[in-house]
Structure formats: C-alpha cells, structure tokens
Amino acid sequence: MTNDEREIKRKLRVLKRADELGNAMGFWSAGEIIIAKFFAGLWLHKNNFDFDLFEAASTLDSHNRSIITEWLLDPFWP
C-alpha cells in the first residue's frame, strides 16, 4: 500500500458520516476524490458519491487504476 492510499484510508476512517466525506472532498485532489468515491461506494455498498468508471480511467494514474482493476477482477465487499 502506498503512502497516498494510507492517507486516503486514514481520511475515510476519520470521517464518521457520509456528508462529512462530501464536505471534505472539496479540499482533495481529483485523484483522491475519485479513489475516495470508489472506496466509499465499496464500503457503503452503493454509489452515493457518483463514482464514474470512465472518469477514473481517464484521470487516475496507472497505480490507482490498478486498484480498481484488481477489485473488478476479484470483487469483495467489506
């Protein structure tokens, strides 16, 4: 796990409610927002934050795209 992934996970743990996540995203980079939307959807089992696979594919670097790709190949839900 990279430092960026650790930081995103830390941010998600700190935020206790979905509305706080939405407010916090205003201060994050585009890539952080996309990955946070993906992980939030995975955690909540629904797409509350409008995660867009096409946006992710065109915006994220190869490492972050691989996180989503690996999940698509072997999905799981916490």
Image: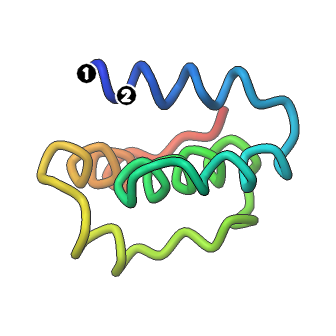
Q: Position of residue 66 (x, y in %)?
A: 21, 48
Given residues 62 and 11, the one toward you in this image is 11
- Helix, strand or loop at mark 1: loop
Q: Are marks 2 and 1 in contact (CB under 8 Å)?
A: yes
Q: Is residue 32 left or right of residue 27?
A: left
Between 56 and 78, which is closer to the camera in this rendering?
Answer: 56
Task: Spot the residue most to the bottom.
Answer: 54
The residue at the point 73 percent across, 46 percent down is 21
Mark 1 residue type? Thr
Asked if residue 9 lies left or right of residue 56, the reply is right
Q: Are there few (<14), some (14-19), or many (20+) residues within 10 Å of tag 1?
A: few
Quadrant (top left, top right, bottom left, bottom right) of the N terminus: top left
**Residue for point 12% across, 52% down:** 62
Q: Quadrant of the C terminus?
A: top right
Q: Amino acid at mark 2?
A: Glu
Q: What label sits on residue 5 in the rendered view?
A: 2
Name the residue at 45% across, 58% down: 34
The picture places residue 73, in percent across and down from the top left corner, at 31, 52
Residue 53 lies left or right of residue 44; in this view the side is: left
Could you tell me which residue is drawn at 60 percent across and 27 percent down?
11
Q: Is residue 4 above or below residue 1?
A: below
Q: Quadrant of residue 15?
A: top right
Using the image, determine if residue 24 lies above or below residue 26.
above
Tell me the number on the disc at residue 30. none
The extreme left residue here reads 62
Q: Which residue is label 1 attached to?
A: 2
x and y percent of residue 65 in the render? 24, 54
Q: For marks 2 and 1, give the CA distance.
A: 5 Å
